[in-house]
């Protein structure tokens, strides 16, 4: 009797093993393989004053890696397999060469963490591909210089500035002092703040350029009270994307006022303190994999890969143009752990998303703020709305 039971058990195990092998063979032979390219290039920012907590060098890449793992967890049930081919380089020329190499290998789907000019070069070099911008907040790419094969998973500067301005209006902090750094990125951030101030009725009582070029740390600490002496204001807005002086503005102003913008109270695409709507589980998975906190570029790369996976699951194919068409047709609602379904705007390819407003250790608010309405989607009150976009986005 025991021998019969043993033979029966062996027979069942053999059948199960054969079925498992057949499943693996089918995935390997007939399953849908989706390779995704990751292209990373961040210019050297040079020596910074606020470098006590440096920016992670692998920002963006680790978010894409986590999204590949998440996509394969669900993809195996649909006979889909995702892989990441990554290239993180130190020059625009090397980035373009890496992109061409991946394209020659058959890749047509890319996540790009690079400045706007590099994104333009890649868009022109890969016209038959779909690129997700996870590294440039440049407003011109969403308003006047739209690239036909690029979708934007990173929020634009206009979205960030609008999110902050809405919060200022809600708190009735409507008189601001604007301090602007010297770099082109600082000027672009300041332009977004001016646009948001005009849009939501915030008054800029004074604007001052930060032009100290000697011992800036000493200048920031010693000269800031006199530097910020002007007509009375409710809040100080700082445009200092590099971090040259902005960290030394809080608690040094002439009037005892809060500081916001690139430092202090900051609008961002993602932050460690975002924990609701399942975000805490995403944070834990990321920290277990990367050994650090998830930042805005990590989230932008993560949601870019998840956008591809969601589209592939719906289409049952990985054609770049089909994915683009689906994403821009409002038929691809995405779960980004932000409390609302996310989607791409048809007029400029920007991902609609709520914007957390944070201080370094806490979530303060989330925009769009209550009461800021829109005819179709409240999230379109952040950034460039359709009537404001002059580029032709097919």
Image: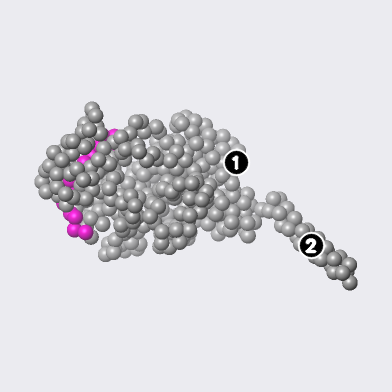
For disc 2, the marked residue is: 13
Q: Quadrant of the N terminus?
A: bottom right
Q: Which residue lies furthest to the left in this view?
A: 231
Residue 261, x across and y down, in percent: 27, 47
Q: Is residue 14 left or right of residue 93?
A: right
Q: In this view, does 268 lie to the left or right of 314?
A: left
Residue 42, x across and y down, in percent: 42, 36
Pick the front one: 349 or 292? 292
Pick the front one: 34 or 288? 288
User: Do we see residue 184 in this rendering?
Assistant: no
Q: Give the range drawn in magenta.
A: 171-187
For disc 1, the marked residue is: 106
Q: Residue furthest bottom?
A: 1
Who's the residue at 86% across and 65% down the image?
7
User: Do we see residue 363 in this rendering?
Assistant: yes
Distance of mark 1 from mark 2, alpha carbons?
Answer: 40 Å
Who's the residue at 36% across and 57% down the image?
354
Q: In this view, does 273 lie to the left or right of 33?
A: left
Who's the residue at 23% across and 42% down the image?
249
Please report contact status of discs 1 and 2: CB closer than 8 Å, yes or no: no
Residue 185, x across and y down, in percent: 31, 38
Q: In which quarter of the image is residue 277?
A: bottom left
Is 286 in the magenta?
A: no
Q: In which quarter of the image is residue 145?
A: top left
Mark number displayed over residue 350: none
Residue 73, x across and y down, in percent: 59, 56
Above/below status of 138 relative to 217: below
Pick the front one: 71 or 66? 66
Who's the residue at 21% across and 50% down the image?
258
């Amino acid at each position: 009797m025991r021998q019969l039971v043993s033979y029966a058990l062996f027979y069942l195990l053999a059948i199960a093993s054969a079925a498992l092998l057949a499943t693996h063979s089918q995935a390997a032979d007939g399953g849908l393989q989706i390779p995704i390219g990751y292209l990373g290039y961040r210019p050297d920012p040079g020596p910074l004053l606020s470098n006590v907590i440096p920016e992670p060098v692998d920002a963006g890449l680790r978010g894409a890696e986590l999204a590949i793992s998440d996509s394969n967890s669900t993809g195996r049930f649909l006979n889909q397999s995702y892989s990441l081919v990554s290239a993180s380089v130190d020059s625009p020329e090397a980035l373009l060469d890496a992109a061409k190499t991946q394209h020659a290998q058959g890749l047509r789907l890319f996540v790009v963490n690079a400045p706007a000019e590099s994104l333009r070069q890649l868009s022109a070099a890969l016209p038959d591909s779909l690129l997700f911008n996870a590294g440039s907040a440049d407003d011109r790419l969403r308003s006047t210089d739209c690239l036909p094969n690029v979708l934007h998973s990173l929020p634009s500067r206009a979205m960030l500035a609008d999110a902050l301005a809405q919060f200022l209006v809600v708190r009735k902090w409507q008189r601001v002092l604007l301090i602007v750094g010297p770099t082109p990125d600082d000027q672009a951030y300041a332009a977004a703040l001016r646009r948001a101030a005009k849009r939501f009725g915030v008054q800029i009582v004074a604007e001052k350029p930060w032009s100290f070029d000697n011992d800036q740390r000493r200048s920031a600490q010693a000269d800031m009270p006199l530097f910020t002496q002007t007509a009375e204001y409710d809040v100080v807005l700082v445009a200092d994307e590099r971090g040259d002086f902005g960290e030394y503005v809080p608690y040094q102003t002439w009037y005892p006022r809060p500081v916001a913008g690139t430092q202090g109270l900051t609008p961002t695409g993602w932050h460690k303190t975002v924990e609701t709507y399942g975000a805490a589980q995403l944070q834990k998975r990321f920290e277990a994999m990367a050994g650090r906190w998830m930042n805005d570029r990590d989230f932008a790369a993560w949601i870019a890969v998840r956008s591809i996976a969601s589209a592939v699951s719906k289409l049952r194919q990985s054609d770049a143009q089909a994915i683009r068409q689906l994403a821009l047709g409002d038929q691809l609602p995405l779960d980004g752990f932000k409390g609302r379904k996310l989607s791409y705007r048809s007029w400029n390819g920007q991902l609609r998303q709520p914007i957390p407003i944070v201080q370094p250790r806490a979530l303060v608010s989330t925009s769009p703020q209550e009461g800021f309405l829109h005819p179709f989607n409240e999230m379109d009150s952040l950034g460039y709305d359709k009537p404001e976009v002059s580029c032709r986005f097919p």
